Image (tube, rainbow, N blue to C red):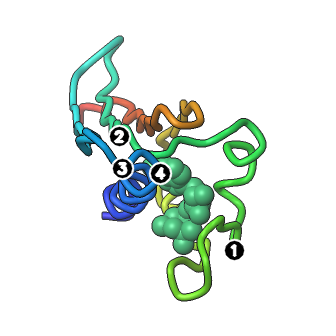
């Protein structure tokens, strides 16, 4: 939910910045690679620069105005993912978009 809400907010910002012919696109992908299950959320929203990317998992880090965000979503998501023994990776480019990838390790056969 949090990845999708973030993507929608980023795409709304991109829409306001670009005005003409912008078509918001959020792609959710799930596939297997090297024995891992990967879930990807890729949007063509406003993207992020490197400085932002390096801070997004910190509690209370937000670039949104008051009332729009408190900066806890990704910190909580990160905690949940870590507790499950999973990894999360982020790739983003300013004005292009962002992609969050979650890697789920195989469960051990019982
Ligand atoms: N899909 C995205 N596109 C652009 N920026 C994002 C995206 N997801 C997260 N961010 C950045 O990460 C910050 C932290 O996100 P989050 O922890 O969910 O808190 P919040 O949404 O309350 O700001 C956001 O304020 C935003 O700057
Ligand atoms: Mg959020």
Q: Residue 9 carries which label?
A: none
Would you say the beta carbon of the disc 4 residue lies within 8 angstroms of ligand 1?
A: no
Q: In which quarter of the image is ligand 1?
A: bottom right
Residue at (51%, 38%) from the top-left corner?
A: 87
Sequence-earlier tag: 2 or 3: 3
Sequence-earlier tag: 3 or 1: 3
Task: Give the quarter of the figure containing the C terminus.
Answer: top left
Looking at the image, which is closer to me, 67 or 75? 67
Looking at the image, which is closer to me, 3 or 19? 19
Name the residue carrying label 4: 17
Q: Which mark is residue 60?
A: 1
Q: Which mark is residue 19?
A: 3
Name the residue carrying label 2: 43
The answer to whether residue 41 is seen in the rendering is yes
The residue lying furthest to the bottom in this view is 67
Label 2 close to label 3 by CB (< 8 Å): no
């Amino acid at each position: 939910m949090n990845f999708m809400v973030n993507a929608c907010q980023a795409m709304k910002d991109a829409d306001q910045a670009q005005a003409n012919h912008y078509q918001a696109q959020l792609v959710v992908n799930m596939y297997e690679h090297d024995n891992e299950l990967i879930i990807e959320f890729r949007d063509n929203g406003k993207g992020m620069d490197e400085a932002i990317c390096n801070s997004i998992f910190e509690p209370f880090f937000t670039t949104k105005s008051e009332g729009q965000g408190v900066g806890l979503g990704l910190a909580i998501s990160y905690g949940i993912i870590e507790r499950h023994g999973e990894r999360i990776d982020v790739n983003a480019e300013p004005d292009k978009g962002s992609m969050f990838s979650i890697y789920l390790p195989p469960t051990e056969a019982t």
